Image (spheres, helix red, strand yellow):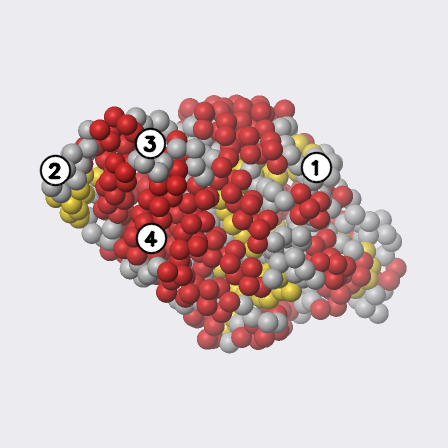
Amino acid sequence: MKIFLADLTYTQATLASDVVPAAIGGLAELLERECAVEVEIFKLPEVLLSRLEQEQPNVLGLSNYIWNSTLSSKVAKIVKKYFPKIITVTGGPNIPSEKDELHSFLINNLQFDFAVLKEGEIGIKNLINFLKDMNRNSNLNQITELESQGFAFLDNDNQLIMGKLARYLNLEDLPSPYLSGRLDPFLDGKFLPVLQTNRGCPFTCTFCTEGQHYWSKVQRKPLDLIRKEISYIAKKLTQTSNPRRDLLISDSNFGMYEPDLEVAKEIANVQKEFNYPTYINVATGKNKKERVLETAKIVNGAMKLAGSVQSLNEQVLVNIKRDNISPDGLLQMALEAASIGTNTYSEVILGLPGDSKEAHFDTLKKLMDAGFTTIAMYQMMLLPATEMNKIESREKYGFKSKFRLLPRCFGYYEFLGEKFYSAEIEEIVISHKSLSEADYLSCRVLNLLVTLFYNDGIFLEFHRLIKQLNGSSFDWIYSIFQSIPNSNFQELVHSFKLDTLGELWSTYEELELATTETGIVQQAIEGLVGHNILFFYKSKSLSEWINPLFNLAATTYKDYLKSLSPNNFGLLSLVDDMFLYREAQISEIFSAVKSVTFDLNNLSQTQKILNELEQGKNINLELLIQSQNSNPKQSTLFELDDIKFNELKAFIELFGDTDIGRSRILSRIFLRNFFRQPTGYQSTFKQSQSAIPSSQFGLRET
């Protein structure tokens, strides 16, 4: 028996999912060992379709995630059209496990003969053994429940046959697709290596596919296997011409368990030998903050600490069954992370049941006051196979939803001369019983302002000065929010609102029909639709709108400082120079302008303030203000060094100096690394590093 397994990703706009296909690689290893079959794995649709034209396997398995569900479905349909005898199988988080939902899924997706449920190892092994032993045209009604454990299908009468759900409890027994060399073609510097050190999650969040009881028991891989896999990955990557330096750990709560400390030590040993990984993408533990902090220390600051609160409103947390997570512990973790030089980020979801404009604003305020360096703001998605997606939840909370393209997940492909279009569609909540559509839109505007004025450290020093004066970063940003109607920035924000609503479709069917034709998919590939709106408007703000942006920032900032220190007029003159200095560092940066000249009152004093604030020091405001003089403005040349300038030009040449091009650049770089500096200036503060080296640009978007 010949089997093809595919974890497909869209490729036209960018690699939508650039993760090494380790999951299907592990299934391939298991099947070859346990079932005596031959398995090939695929990631790119073009490669799979070309291979299928040359040779047809007995079984084609296609993964089903939020970013490739439609693509897998359309590939299955067109393959079935030309080769109906190929047995098609689907599996992944999107596959429901409750009988009514599963039956409906299979009825509506007849291009799939079988569905593998949950983890996959038990179901795929039982399915392949079953297929080897049966005549496909025999009476499927006679299969026993034990034979169908872990998978499901429709019998000859379109009745659901579903075996019991079971977990693969012995992860020590799973063969490694890394150590076998099966994943070597993907360790080429283009794909992101992924490791799983444990599987399962004790939390029951209703918006998450792992919130079901099935996943509640956490299983661990043996430390020795993890050690070997990390070393193997590091060796392979360092042998490539463009080595990646990042690693994805797919655990749901890394650092929360005692054995995670040992895993971190193994990573640290590999870091010493290979300088890999320098950046770890991982969801850190939601409880046990002391252990999470210790884990971060061990890996030398390579991982951001995630305080993914989603909301800090008590009723919302009860509604989403997240009240067994300590919000206070997550906030305290952010305060302590600065002591070990580790960045922190938090995730917030707008539109959760019980959420409101006031609750959303309050959550953002608490996260800023706690000192999280980045706040990732998402919208409430109704994901398949989650409790929140059930009819009961929709009716209970009065969800009103709309549909939009999932960013980067669209394209067109060809099989045996027939072209087909595909795009992933997500359903988001835009209002419910406690959140009006108008309030939803106001929250999205505030999300834009947080993206512009708080995230990525563009105004880092300004926020640290506010903290020194016992103020609140949120209060400054909220003052910007209130000032927009009377500012030149109003036009851009109005355009943002129109696009926020304009990307939404009333029904799934309308948008799905539109994606079957050339127009909308081609527009999406060109970046005209289907992009990340927050990044898109960030790029507009930092390019053609940079002067109104800085005028609004400076005006509101000085007004806010007056409220904190009413009689400190000398401070305001210093702040003017700070804003001029920062604007000079990024003005026309995306037009590949290497140097600019700005007029400042006191260059050396401004440098001193910014440098000390950047390093987290409190500055002596009285002494600085006393030394302020009335010298005339001096022209100062700000330049980007040749290495950074050439690196930035390479990004711009690839993506272009357009709104969509800049938005893609911003999603890949840490902008502070590209700040111009006054001629001859040498910073003593270690800059943060980009997660992705310049050689990998174009391959990943966050």
* Tag 4–tag 2 contact (CB < 8 Å): no
* Tag 3–tag 1 contact (CB < 8 Å): no
Image disc number at residue 652: none
Cα–Cα span, label 2 and label 1: 59 Å
Q: Circle 3 sits in a helix, a strand or a loop, which is it?
A: helix
Q: Which of 349 and 35 is in front in this view?
A: 349
Q: What residue type is labelled 4?
A: Leu
Q: Circle 2 sits in a helix, a strand or a loop, which is it?
A: loop
Image disc number at residue 324: 1
Cα–Cα span, label 4 and label 3: 22 Å
Image disc number at residue 552: 4
Q: Which of marks 2 and 3 is nearer the N terminus?
A: 3
Q: Earlier in the sequence, mark 4 or mark 3?
A: 4
The residue that disc 3 covers is 613
Q: Which of marks 2 and 1 is nearer the N terminus?
A: 1
Q: Nearer the viewer, residue 485 or 345?
A: 485
The residue located at (70%, 62%) in the rendering is 398
Number of callouts: 4
The residue located at (53%, 64%) in the rendering is 405
Spot occupied by residue 285 in the image (x, y as percentages of width and height): 60, 34
Instruction: Say which quadrant the N terminus sits in.
Output: bottom right
Mark 4 or 1: in front is 4
Q: Nearer the viewer, residue 215 or 416?
A: 215
Q: Circle 4 sits in a helix, a strand or a loop, which is it?
A: helix
Q: Which of marks 3 and 1 is nearer the N terminus?
A: 1
Spot occupied by residue 307 in the image (x, y as percentages of width and height): 55, 37
Image disc number at residue 631: 2
Q: Which amino acid does label 1 sit on?
A: Asn
Cα–Cα span, label 4 and label 2: 26 Å
Spot occupied by residue 697 in the image (x, y as percentages of width and height): 36, 49
The residue located at (50%, 52%) in the rendering is 17
